[in-house]
Structures are given as structure tokens and as C-alpha cells.
Image (cartoon, grey):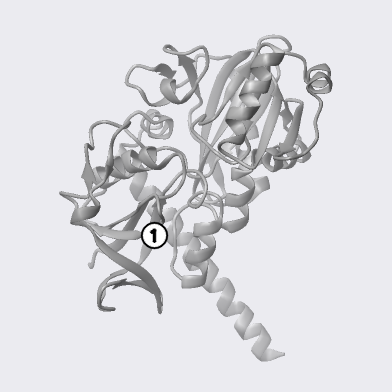
Amino acid sequence: MSKKRICLLFGGKSGEHEISLQSAKAVYEALDKNKYDVTLIGIDKQGHWLLGDGATYLLQAQDYKTTKLNTAAMQAIVPAPKVGAASLVAQENGQEVGTIDLVMPIMHGPFGEDGKLQGMLECLGVPYVFSGVLASALGMNKYKAKLVASKAGLKTAADIALTRGADFNLENIIRELSLPVVVKPNELGSSVGMTIAKTKEELERGMEIAFKHDEQIILEQFIAGRELTVPVMGNNPAEALPVIEIIPKVSAWFDYKAKYEPGGSDEVCPAQIPDDVRRRAQADAVKIFQALGCADLARVDFIWSKDDGQLYFLEINTIPGLTGASLTPKAAQAAGMSFSEFLDKLIELAVARQKNKKTIRKLWILYLGWK
């Protein structure tokens, strides 16, 4: 049986570039090389596509803060369409240097997780893992994801979205949301550019920081409580993995430092919460996964309010982190899957979904032919 040709695509132009490199490293090491021929393509911060070797593609790979692509050891390439696959063409001489059956985009944030890359892969006609164009775009936009969540019956915190250059009144914002206020870029993950403002001055400064990262920011009512996250895996049916509780140790909340520094937080999986809260979190996670039209895998974040006992939807990650410290692999392990088995299942889901799409396409062609 021939090996499936898998392309790991990572890096990119977003502020989560380094986390993407760390996720790709963990995935590459866990993929079963007896089952897969793995091609490594790193995208640098300028957007260039670079073909890498498994032994040399990263520099300072052990340190998430300073890890970077080893561009000197990588070959510039461009993707090109090919029937049922994609061809990799050397930029220097136009020669084909590889073929891939399935892309696994291990990318976080803009240009990788927001539908742009997914649209390009759709145009190339190459299958890929994770959600499609619309679900990725909606999931990346925190404000619009909350609108969908609210329509689907999930509770969400009161919020205000502001676009750069728009008129606003700080006093009115404080009156509407009350302090403290959570301030974050609308389309960025890993808590990059996020602050919690307890005063008017902190709110003003937090908005300045958030606008450095995005054209639109979101201001949210702060809800004190316990942070829970639920990975969802599958396609019709989609199933929730065990609930994880996140307890930050190096910060007051689950910021970039708490997420990625060793020992930055405790992640309790399965979460030690009442059964009714667990069931509600898992049901709501599946509900928003399906409402957005997600595919294969996503991770849904909630706050369980200590004031009213309600569960509030925060955001969804359509390509969740897959580093050694990431939450989703821990939930998979709690469900009885090793990291390698988890990746096998993820690939199987994407392949089955692609076969289903082809079947539907053929049926439409037959139907149109009959007409």
C-alpha cells in the first residue's frame, strides 16, 4: 500500500508565526512515517513558500520565543494545480519538486486560519484538513462568531466592535459594558494584543495596543469565572472530546505567556466540574461547531461564570494549537488517543470528507446531464 503524501504547511505572516512553527514541529515528529510521506513547507513572514528538509527546517527549535525558519537551507517553491493533487514547482527553474495528496495547514491567525489559505487550496483543487473558507473566516472573526453563537442559542458576553478611525466615546463604552473590560484584536489568536482594562486609562491604552494588531477590535464585558475549553472532532456526527479547565499560574488570565511558557498554566483534563456543566459545555461546543459549518476539528472556549452559573461562549479556534503544551492533544489523550492516533483520525476525517465532496459533485454532474 502506497504512502499518503501529506504536506505540512506552517509559518505565515501572522503574529502567531512562531507558535505555528512549534505546532508543525510537534505534528511532524508525531506523524507515522510508515504511513505518510511528509513534505514540509514553511511560509516566511513575507509570504514566501519554502520547501524544507525534516532535519534542518527550523532554527532554535526548542525555544518558542526565538524559533524561526532556516530559510538558508530551504528551497523557494510555488504550488500548482494537478489532477487530484497539487504540484510543487521550484521557483528558480520551474521544475516539479514534489506532489502532495493532502495539505495539513498548521497555521494560526490571519492568512492561515481565516479562510484566505483555504480559498487558495480550493482553487488549486487540493484536499486539506480542517474547516473550509466560510467557517474559517467566521471563526477567525470573533465578533461574527459570537453573532452566530447567539443565533444558535449560546450565551455570549455583551460586546462592542470598533473599527480603526471610527468615532467612539469612552464614557459611553464604560457605561454600557462596565469595568473591567476585555480588549482584544478581532481577528487574532493566542491572546496576542489582548488586555483587561480596570480603569478608563487602561481601557484607552488597551485599545491602542489592540489596534496595533488589527483594523477592528472587540471590547467585551468581563465575566469572572472558570475558563473551560472543549475540542470537537468529526463530521456528521461531530463529537466533543473531554472538557479541559485552564488555570493560569504566571498571569492573572490565560494570556500568551500562560499559554506557551512551560508551567505557565495548569490544564485539568477531564475538568473537575459538575456533570451538568460538562454536558452543557460539550453540547454547546458541538452546536457552534455545526452552526459555523466547521470540519474535522476545532476547539471552543467558554467562561463558566461564578456569578450566575451560566456558560458563556468566548471564541472558536478552527486550527487549534498542536504544540507539546497545547490543549487539544491533551483532550485526545484523555479520550484514549495517542498524538499519532489523533493525527491519523484527523487525516482520515479529511480524506472521507473529500470523498464525500467528490461523490456529491459527480451526482450533480449526472443530474445536470440528465436535464
Which residue occupies the extreme bottom position in the image? 370
Kindly indicate the quadrant of the structure image that contains residue 227. top right
* Residue ID at (45%, 26%): 256
Question: In this figure, which residue is indicated by the disc labeled 1?
Answer: 103
Give the amino acid at mark 1: Val
Q: Is residue 236 above or below residue 315?
A: below
Q: Inspect this view and state whether residue 355 appears.
A: yes
Q: Position of residue 347 (x, y in %)?
A: 38, 54
How many discs mark residues in the rendered view? 1
Which residue occupies the extreme left position in the image? 55
Q: Is residue 330 above or below residue 365?
A: above
Q: Quadrant of the C terminus?
A: bottom right
* Residue ID at (42%, 30%): 327
Q: Position of residue 66 (x, y in %)?
A: 29, 34
User: Disc 1 on helix, strand or loop?
Assistant: strand
Which of these two is toward me, 58 or 203?
203
Q: Position of residue 51 (x, y in %)?
A: 26, 60
* Residue ID at (50%, 44%): 109
Q: Quadrant of the N terminus?
A: bottom left
Q: In the figure, is residue 231 to the left or right of 177?
A: left
Q: In the figure, is residue 158 to the left or right of 42?
A: right
Residues packed near mark 1 inside 10 Å, few (<14), some (14 to 19) or many (20 plus): many
Q: Is residue 351 above or below residue 151?
A: below
Q: Position of residue 169 (x, y in %)?
A: 81, 26
Q: In the figure, is residue 371 to the left or right of 318?
A: right
